[in-house]
Amino acid sequence: MVTIEINGQQVEAEQGQMLIEAADKAGIAIPRFCYHKNLSISASCRMCLVEVEKAPKPMPACATPVADGMVVNTKSTYALAAQKSVMEFLLINHPLDCPVCDQGGECDLQEFSIGYGSDKSQYAEIKRVVKDKDIGPLIATELTRCIHCTRCVRFGQEIAGMRELGATGRGDWMEIGTYIEKSIDSELSGNIIDLCPVGALTSKVSRFTYRVWELANNDSISAHDCIGSNCNAQTKNGEIKRVISRQNDSINDAWISDRDRYSFEGLQSDDRLTKPMIKKDGAWTEASWDDALQFAVNSLKDIKDKSQIGTVCSPSVTTEEMYLLQKVMRGIGSNNIDHRLRQSDFRGQDQDPLFPGLGMSVADVAAQQAAILIGSNVRKEQPIMGHQLRQASLKGAKISFVNPVSFDANFNVAHEFTIAPSQMFKELKVLAKVALENSSAGAPEGLAALVSSVKVTDEHKQCIAELSDADNSMVILGTIVQAMPNYSAMRILASYIADASNSTLSYLTPGANTSGAYLSGLLPNRTQVAQGEFANTDGLDTQAMFAQKLKAYILYGIEVERDLDNPVQASQALDNADFVVSLSAFVTDAIKAGSDVILPISTITESSGTLINVAGIWQSFNAVSKAKGLSKPGWKVLRVMGNLFNIDGFDYQSSEDVINELKSALALENSQSETSRATNQLVWDCPENISAQTTDIQRIAELSIYNVDAVTRRATALQKTQDAQVDVAKINSALAKKLKLEDAQAVTAKQADNTAQVTISIDNKITDNCVYLSAGNVAASSLGGGFDTIELIPA
Amino acid sequence: MSEINKDLINAASRVDIDQWVAKYPADQKQSAVMAALRIVQDQNGGWLTTELMDAVASYLDMDKIHVYEVATFYSMYEHKPVGKHKICVCTNISCMVCGSGEIVDHLEDKLDVKMGGTTEDNRFTLKEVECLGACSGAPMIQIGEHYYENLDAEKIDKILEELK
């Protein structure tokens, strides 16, 4: 530690810290444009010039390291004169038309001009004009306003890991842009809007729909992946106008993904359900809440055998809703409750941990020295986790993948085992064999025999050695492997590999609140009984519920044809059912076709609630935007249902009452906001050997980035991005040659009796003999299981 | 994709670029970017296309935009076709004081083309440049790799004659 003096105030600073950091910590404001705490230092704007005693000239605070005894003045005449001059130069080419600029009112240049600038300019010459560029559907450019701070350029290089923007030309001709016409495709691209200190980069979706002083700030939590990024959803007249990031150094740093930023557009979709609806004699009519709820409850009461009722819930609703939903269902005597929409192998479910999570904080991931991700396209599934892994990688971490597709990574990948889904178990056997050979502990029962026949390569050895040699390392199970047909066997092997290499077994889970679903008991196989204790129950999992064609279903926040692993099977079960109630924020023909009553529930931003992220952090939030029409927060609807069923204990006054009840059930203090992270490691239970010699072509289904939930699917700008263009069947050139198919050819994809029309796209990142046809998109809605065999027939 | 791009760089250029790459540490291949751009520019008759810059990016494992930045920063890289001989006329202070204005006028008259333009027969391109570090010989021009110093109209005529 060193002591310096800033403006006469003694300030403690760390050795090597820059002046601006020390000043920020002490609450002393220094104006800046190019400096940003989460980016590298460029010292190009010179706005932070300060007076340092004994220095021959004003020094940039962002690039001047502190030294013991340094005497700094940020407000002396000398410092202010320097800042004023810089300001004058910055304004030379900047238009002075703040009233027509979208940034007006929240612009650093505007603010600092008032605070540190002059009221007149000596510049009488012509200002330069820079042509705007089209950089895609999300970000609008007004490059004449750019002051060349290069934050956006550094963000691309350092955080997004895709250097898409650059500064071309020089001097007066320097321009920020892509040089060639191209869209910005990073999944974190929207952050450059928050970073831009002026109005050069603004949101194409939000701009000019508000003035910034009309917006109300609402702290909120992003609900599109399991990270729980902190955001600020800004509203005008109760309607979300834009979402910006909110700093949280233990979760998302200063960033949010584009999905979290732009999904709010889906809230205004035309197909929002505003009134309860009842189907009578095949015709849909609007109904009052009383009638609709009474109708739903009476119809469910008519089902005498309660084990004939199945409840399927989205993993992206609030914990309060999940807790009440399972409480209602268990209250009427049904344990058929599940939120695991895409899982198809439930054999290991009784070994599930308290909740499947990271086993560490989100920020801890950046401190790992090695990791192996199994079945994960982390960058697109949980962009902020991708960011944390990239930060680890930049510090030298060895990160490897076992995946059916060689997904684009934005960091150096140590080892990549790209292999068909059917072969992934074998691949894990190889890794387990290496781990076993390296381990000093004895082999668990049956493992030696299980792995005896597989061949080990040097690359496998290196990969495991990197895990074992690291002080901190993790074995991560991604959402792709969790959806695979032999997930339970692979998970046991992954757990063994983690155990033997002294790594943490981690899960990256689907949806925003899988942790909440586990902790609230939204599972068929267990329910809470007392302080943190769970009892086993014997309900049906998602797959079984639809396979067994029950008499009644409750669908909570899901669109069957888009949200389930096997949409066709589910649709058939709904057609066959006597009674189906959908609680949904949207109404579509598909929902109508499959339901008898539809109740409009609020989306996450329209209701108060709590999300529990993959690290076990409980984050509660208030309602941000106005409910649509007569729609109501889900917890209120469920409270009424509980009462209509005469179940005890549904007298909640607020969503807080609900979450506090759950907290005490879990033996958590009300004020506590974190569930302790128990180990995820499993008890060894030797998996059956699966031989996977098949010549069939296997489908690979990944839930693509902008298809994850009903709101995101309706966000029009996101749907125009490159990442959203997934309505194709991707195969590699070897398979294309074998099947005599060409790029862009129209084909019929066939799984058992189900077909869909798709276009071929040749992509050599796909492993041999597999068809990548992502889940959740339109074509997939008429197909079966995500990893079933598939045929491609030329149309 | 990158393979096709790399093919744009011919074998001789690759040998040249590799020589430059060898001068730098193995993990800092991008240090050779300026030399590589010059080499492919020469190969392409004096100017760079986006495809060539992409090829250099993929050859040196760089982001494309990084190459564009370098190629647009330095004035010796051309982004439009140029004539067989590019005449770079220094108009910076020393040359200006010593009469670069007359050199410019004379060249423009003689070749019937304005600064920045190329003659109809594609033989000459005129380009105004900043100081080339030859103030002792002002006024001066650079053509190809040669400096021509202490110029006047007669000398220019002779130089142009020789280059025809």
Image (cartoon, coloured by chain):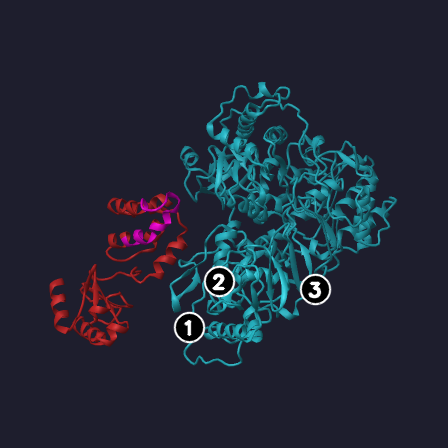
Q: Are marks 2 and 1 in contact (CB under 8 Å)?
A: no
- Of badges 3 and 2, the one in the foreground is 2
Q: Are marks 3 and 2 in contact (CB under 8 Å)?
A: no
Q: Are marks 3 and 2 on the same chain?
A: yes
Chain bearing mark 2: A
Residue A43 is marked as 2
Question: Does residue A342 show up?
Answer: yes
The residue nearer to you, when weighing B105 against A308, is B105
Label 1 sits on what residue type? Arg
Residue shown at the point (73%, 33%) measured from the top left? A540
Within the image, what quadrant is residue B80 found in? bottom left
Give the mark nearest the N terminus, 3 or 2: 2
Give above or below for A124 relative to A347. Answer: below
Q: How many marks?
A: 3
Question: How many C-alpha atoms fall within 10 Å of the one at disc 3: few (<14), some, or many (≥20)?
Answer: some
Identify the residue under disc 3.
Answer: A238
Magenta highlight on residue A775: no
Q: Magenta region: which residues?
A: B21-38
